[in-house]
Amino acid sequence: MTRLGYQIPNFTYPDVAADQLFPTVVAQAVEAERSGFDTVLVMDHFYQLPILGSPDEAMFECYTLLSALAQHTTEVRLSALVTGNTYRHPTLLAKTVTALDVVSGGRGQLGIGAGWFELEHDSLGYEFGTFTDRFEKLEESLQIVLGMLNRSTPSLDGKWYQVDEAMNVPAPLSKIPVMIGGGGERKTLRMVAQYADESNLICAVGDIGRKLDALAGHCERLGRNRSEITVSLQTSACIAPTHDEAVAEFEAYLARNPAAEVRRESTIVGDSDEVAARFGELLATGIDGVTVNAPANGHVPGRVSLLGQTLAPLIG
């Protein structure tokens, strides 16, 4: 389960040539594995998100990238954070995640959400629909995908998807953990309680307690043991050997990515002691772990290692 995950959300790095882009991504994954992260995750998007850069910045298709990273790592789990359900038919998604699990030697993980980036849908021809549509699709998709991942042959005559004894051969090598991303208290956390092994919250720190209470309430109503579900919080950090280096690298990132200014208050910036103290406060809220991205300086050699070495002792 993901208790300390490293997410790679961006692929536009200063002074990194195109032929060095993938090696730079690999280096981050390898540093993450060696420094104590248990999961490496990438976004499932085709355009860069507004809070990270412009739509025309580099973005890899996530499952192709994860399968490639599987060949350069040996222990970390590999996952999308999170799969946009609207981008793939559930039977294709089940086959894709299974392939990731097989080529990684049993390290595949399914992170999934309803989908939300309207520009991406409209531009590339994916049906966006309403908020209700997307959550109805997600629930139907989970019924199909989980059945296929769990070695059954599900059939569904649903509103959005129709499958008839869908087979999945070869089967996954191991039980694939399922993470649902988001913090919606009425729909998302109810689906976590009903279908998932993990919840990845995206919310303000002050809202964590309420989210955990909502999840516990759904578990109680559904007869699910809340302790079976791992809860992590999505976070951002910019760490460096000294406070001044961390601040300089973060400010340089904002200068070349003005759209990321909105991340100033939510990003934890500092040296190891400062970062450890801030993450210690987050873990004291009752969550089980964190997923962390480092778009400002994750590409700088040694920064991901420093982040893992700082945070792993806090997770225990």
Image (cartoon, rainbow, N blue to C red):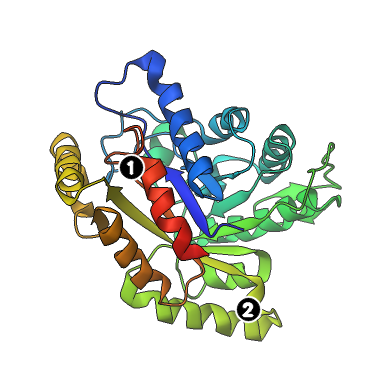
Under circle 2, the secondary element is helix
N-terminal label among 2 and 1: 1
Pinpoint residue 75: horizontal percent, then vertical percent: 63, 42
Rendered residue at 85%/37% (across/down):
169
How crowded pointer 2 is (Cα within 10 Å; few <14, some 14-19, many 20+) is rated as: some
Closer to us: 125 or 9: 9
Query: Label 2 sits on what residue type?
Result: Arg
Under circle 1, the secondary element is loop
List the residue tagged with mark 2: 226
List the residue tagged with mark 1: 49
Rendered residue at 57%/45% (across/down):
79
Closer to us: 229 or 164: 229
Question: Which residue appears farthest toward the top when viewing the image?
Answer: 19
Left or right position of 311 against 50: right
Where 314 falls versus 128 (above or below)?
below
Query: Label 1 sits on what residue type?
Result: Leu
Disc number for residue 231: none
Where 316 falls versus 244 (above or below)?
below
Left or right position of 157 against 237: right
Q: On the image, which quarter does residue 279 sit in?
A: bottom left
